[in-house]
Image: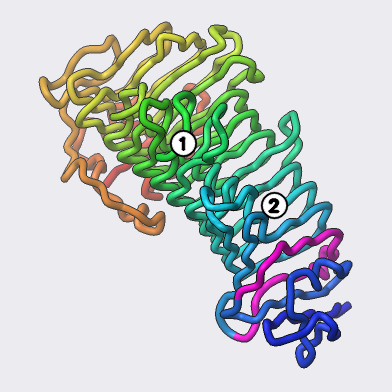
C-alpha cells in the first residue's frame, strides 16, 4: 500500500487537493485529514509554517505515516504560544528533518514543543526544537518510541522528558539516541518543583539513553529547593544510561542538585555506565531516594568518570548519596565499581546527613579529592579494592582494603570535551599497564558480579583493574 503524499507550501492554498502541483498552504489543512497507512506529510524546506500539527491514528508496521520536509533544507513549524506538533493516540508514525519553534519560555509559549501522548511505535529523528516553556519533547504514557538525533535547546522545563500518570509501565520500550539537550534554563511558572533538566525520565520501563549530552541546563530555575540534573530518571525500571556526556549543568542560586547524572527515587534494576561528567554544580553521579517514592534497589554505577563536579550545590563531591525517606529498607542494593572520581576542589564522595541505606558496595574505584575523600557517615557500606588520594596531603586511610597512593594520571583536570564522539579517545585518567592499579583490585567476577568486558574507552577491561580507563 503506497498511501498518499500531502504537500504544504506557503504559496499553496488550503482549497486545493494537497498534491505536489496543488499544495496546501497551512498546518491546519493537514490536521483536518485522518492520515492512514503509507501516507506522507511534507512541508516545503526553508519555509516556516505557523500553528500546531496534530496527528491521530496513523499507519501500520509495514506502512507507517511519514512527516518531514521536501525540496531541500528543513521546514519550520512555529507553534507560537502552543505546541508545534502533537501526536495523540497515534501509531506507526515517523517524523524526520523538521525545526520546531516556540515563542520562547518567557515570551509567550506555555507548552511542549513535540508531544507524543498515548501513542505507540513512533520514531523521531533529525529534529531541532527550541523556544518552548515546558519540554522541547515530551513522551507521555507511550510505548515503542525512538528518538534519534534530536537537538532540544533553549526550552524551559527540560530538553527531553518522559512521563506518565502513575506506575512504571506507563511508558515502555523507549530509546533516546544521539540527542543533545543544551541551554534549557528552567520553567518560569514552576515554583514548586525542579525544572531546567537536560533529559529527565519518570514512570517508565525499559529505557535506553545512549550517546546523548546535556550542558548548561537549569541556571534559571525560579526557586530554591530540589533542582535539575543533566540526565536522570525516577520511578523507573530497567533504565540504561550509557556513553553519555553531562557537563557544566547548573541549578538556581541557593538551589540543590545541578548535577550530571542521577538514579533518583523509585529507580530499580538500572545502570549508568561509560559516561563522562565534569564541571557540574552538583555531583557527577547522584544516588537519591526521596520521601514518598517507591523502593529504590538493585542499581549500578560503573565505568564512569567524574571531574571537578559538585562545587556549588550541597553535595560538594563527585558522588552524592541522599535518602530523605529516612528508611534504609526503601534504599538498598547498590554497586559502585570501576569509576574514576577526580575532584581538585571538593571531596570524592559525600553522604548526606539523611542517607540511611543498606547493601551499598564500592569496589575498584579511584577516588581523588582536594583535602578530604569522604564527607558524611559511610555507615556499613563495603569499601574494597579502591585507591584513595588526597591532592593536598597525599594518601589518607579511610578504612578500605585498598590503596593510598597517587594515580599516574597524565594531564588531570581541565577537560573540554563537548561532543560524545570525542569521548572514546578521552585519555586523561587512564591507568597504565605498569601500575599496581592495573592488577590490584578485587576479582568481582568471583563475587558473582558481571562487570562486562569493556572499560570506559571501549578497550578490554583488566580482570583486577582499579579505575574506569586503562592503557
- Residue 56 inside the magenta-drawn segment: yes
Left or right, 216 with reference to 297: left
| Stretch in magenta | 48-71
Q: Give the quadrant of residue 440.
A: top left
Counting from the top left corner in percent of width and height, residue 127 is at 58, 64
Q: Residues within 10 Å of mark 1 (few under 14, many from 20)?
A: many
Which residue is under mark 2? Answer: 115
Q: Which mark is residue 221?
A: 1
Q: Residue furthest front?
A: 107
Residue at image coords 20%, 31% = 344
Counting from the top left corner in percent of width and height, residue 354 is at 46, 10
Q: Relative to 24, does residue 305 appear above or below in the rendering?
A: above
Counting from the top left corner in percent of width and height, residue 421 is at 40, 58
Q: Relative to 278, does residue 316 appear above or below in the rendering?
A: above
- The image quadrant where one finds the N terminus is bottom right
Left or right, 228 with reference to 45: left
- Residue 456 inside the magenta-drawn segment: no
Q: Give the quadrant of residue 169.
A: top right
Looking at the rendered structure, the secondary structure element under dot 2 is: strand
Residue at image coords 84%, 86% = 16
What is the CA distance from the residue labelled 1 to the residue labelled 2? 22 Å
State the predominant SS element of the stretch in magenta: strand
| Residue mark closest to the camera, 1 vs 2 | 1
**Sequence-first tag of 1 and 2:** 2
Amino acid at each position: 500500500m503506497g498511501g498518499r503524499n500531502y504537500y504544504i507550501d506557503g504559496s499553496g492554498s488550503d482549497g486545493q487537493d494537497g498534491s505536489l502541483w496543488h499544495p496546501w498552504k497551512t498546518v491546519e489543512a493537514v490536521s483536518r485529514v485522518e492520515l492512514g497507512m503509507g501516507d506522507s506529510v511534507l512541508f516545503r524546506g526553508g519555509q516556516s509554517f505557523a500553528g500546531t500539527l496534530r496527528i491521530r491514528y496513523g499507519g501500520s508496521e509495514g506502512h507507517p505515516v511519514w512527516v518531514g520536509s521536501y525540496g531541500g533544507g528543513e521546514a519550520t513549524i512555529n507553534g507560537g504560544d502552543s505546541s508545534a506538533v502533537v501526536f495523540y493516540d497515534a501509531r506507526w508514525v515517523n517524523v524526520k528533518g523538521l525545526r520546531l519553534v516556540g515563542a520562547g519560555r518567557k515570551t509567550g509559549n506555555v507548552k511542549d514543543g513535540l508531544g507524543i501522548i498515548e501513542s505507540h511505535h513512533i520514531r523521531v529523528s533529525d529534529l531541532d526544537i527550541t523556544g518552548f516553556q515546558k519540554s522541547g519533547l515530551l513522551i507521555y504514557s507511550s510505548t515503542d518510541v525512538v528518538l534519534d538525533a534530536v537537538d532540544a535547546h533553549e526550552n524551559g522545563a527540560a530538553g527531553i522528558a518522559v512521563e506518565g500518570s502513575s506506575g512504571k509501565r506507563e511508558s515502555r520500550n523507549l530509546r533516546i539516541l544521539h540527542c543533545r539537550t543544551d541551554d534549557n534554563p528552567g520553567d518560569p511558572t514552576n515554583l514548586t518543583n525542579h525544572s531546567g533538566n537536560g533529559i529527565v525520565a519518570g514512570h517508565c520501563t525499559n529505557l535506553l539513553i545512549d550517546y546523548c549530552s546535556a550542558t548548561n541546563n537549569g541556571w534559571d530555575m525560579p526557586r530554591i529547593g530540589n533542582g535539575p540534573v543533566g540526565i536522570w530518571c525516577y520511578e523507573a525500571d530497567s533504565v540504561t544510561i550509557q556513553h553519555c556526556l553531562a557537563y557544566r549543568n547548573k541549578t538556581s542560586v541557593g538551589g540543590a542538585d545541578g548535577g550530571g547524572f542521577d538514579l533518583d527515587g523509585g529507580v530499580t534494576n538500572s545502570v549508568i555506565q561509560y559516561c563522562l561528567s565534569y564541571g557540574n554544580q552538583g555531583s557527577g553521579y547522584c544516588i537519591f531516594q526521596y520521601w514518598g517514592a517507591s523502593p529504590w534497589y538493585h542499581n549500578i554505577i560503573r565505568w564512569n568518570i567524574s571531574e571537578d563536579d559538585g562545587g556549588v550545590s550541597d553535595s560538594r563531591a563527585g558522588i552524592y548519596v541522599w535518602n530523605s525517606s529516612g528508611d534504609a529498607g526503601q534504599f538498598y542494593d547498590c554497586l559502585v565499581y570501576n569509576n574514576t572520581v577526580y575532584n581538585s576542589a571538593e571531596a570524592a564522595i559525600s553522604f548526606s546527613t539523611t542517607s540511611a541505606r543498606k547493601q551499598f558496595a564500592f569496589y575498584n574505584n579511584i577516588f581523588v579529592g582536594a583535602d578530604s575523600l569522604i564527607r558524611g557517615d559511610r555507615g556499613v557500606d563495603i569499601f574494597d579494592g579502591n585507591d584513595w588520594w588526597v591532592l593536598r596531603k597525599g594518601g589518607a586511610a579511610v578504612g578500605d582494603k585498598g590503596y593510598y597512593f597517587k594515580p599516574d594520571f597524565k594531564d588531570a583536570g581541565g577537560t573540554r570535551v563537548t561532543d560524545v564522539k570525542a569521548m572514546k579517545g578521552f585519555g586523561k585518567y587512564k591507568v597504565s599497564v605498569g601500575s599496581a592499579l592495573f592488577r590490584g583490585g578485587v576479582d568481582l567476577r568471583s563475587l558473582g558480579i558481571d562487570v562486562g568486558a569493556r572499560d570506559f574507552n571501549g578497550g578490554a577491561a583488566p580482570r583486577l583493574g582499579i579505575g574506569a580507563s586503562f592503557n
